[in-house]
Image: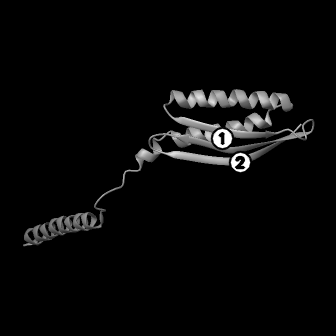
Amino acid sequence: MPSSLSSKKAQFFIMSAVVIVMFAFLISRMTEPTSIPDTSSVAIMDEPFIFNNIVEKARETVEKSKDCEDLKFSLEEYKTFAEEFVQSKNYLLTFNYTLNLTNCPTNATVNFNYIILQSPRITITKSFTQTKSF
């Protein structure tokens, strides 16, 4: 008699485990979203990284200039470099700035009127002012 009772307990245990697993599976399928949005296309876009780097290096060009002439020359060189680099990626860069040298031996102000990066997928724009004291 004891073996019959223990075999029924074992059968009950196995059946209970199977039912619990099936129930958990059904609940997980019902709570699963019907579609998972693919955000990888945004992560692999290099335009925002290129644009942020161009803006950062424009600020750095102003900060590292030694005097007004160096600032003028460095900005023109950087603008040319940035436009050629972006063109090699098949993007379009519009880099417009105004250099205010009225207080020139002591300081200068650069108004980056607009920096625009355009690609077939995205257009990014930024304008800012950077001041440099010599």
- Is residue 17 depicted above or below 65 in this figure? below
Applied colour scheme: one colour
- Is residue 118 depicted above or below 66 in this figure? below
Circle 2 residues within 10 Å: few <14, some 14–19, many ≥20: few
Circle 1 residues within 10 Å: few <14, some 14–19, many ≥20: some
> Which quarter of the rendered picture does the N terminus lie within?
bottom left
Count of labels in the image: 2
Q: For the point 52% across and 45% down, which residue is it?
A: 123
Picture quadrant where residue 99 is located: top right
Side of 82 relative to 67 (left or right): left
Residue 38 percent across, percent down from the top left: 37, 51
Of residues 28 and 101, the one drawn nearer to the viewer in this rendering: 101
Picture quadrant where residue 48 is located: top right
Side of 72 relative to 33 (left or right): right
Picture quadrant where residue 17 is located: bottom left
Contact flag, marks 2 and 1 (Cβ < 8 Å): yes
Q: Secondary structure at mark 2?
A: strand
For badge 2, the amino acid type reads Phe
Q: For the point 68% across and 36% down, which residue is it?
A: 57
Side of 39 relative to 64 (left or right): left
Of residues 75 and 55, the one drawn nearer to the viewer in this rendering: 75
Side of 96 relative to 108 (left or right): left
Q: For the point 30% across and 67% down, which residue is it?
A: 31
- Is residue 27 depicted above or below 53 in this figure? below
- Is residue 119 depicted above or below 70 in this figure? below
> Which quarter of the rendered picture does the C terminus lie within?
top right
Residue 36 percent across, percent down from the top left: 33, 56
Mark 2 or mark 1, earlier in chain: 1
Where does label 2 land, which residue? 128
Query: Which numbered circle lies on residue 55?
Result: 1
Q: Secondary structure at mark 1?
A: helix
Residue 49 percent across, percent down from the top left: 56, 40
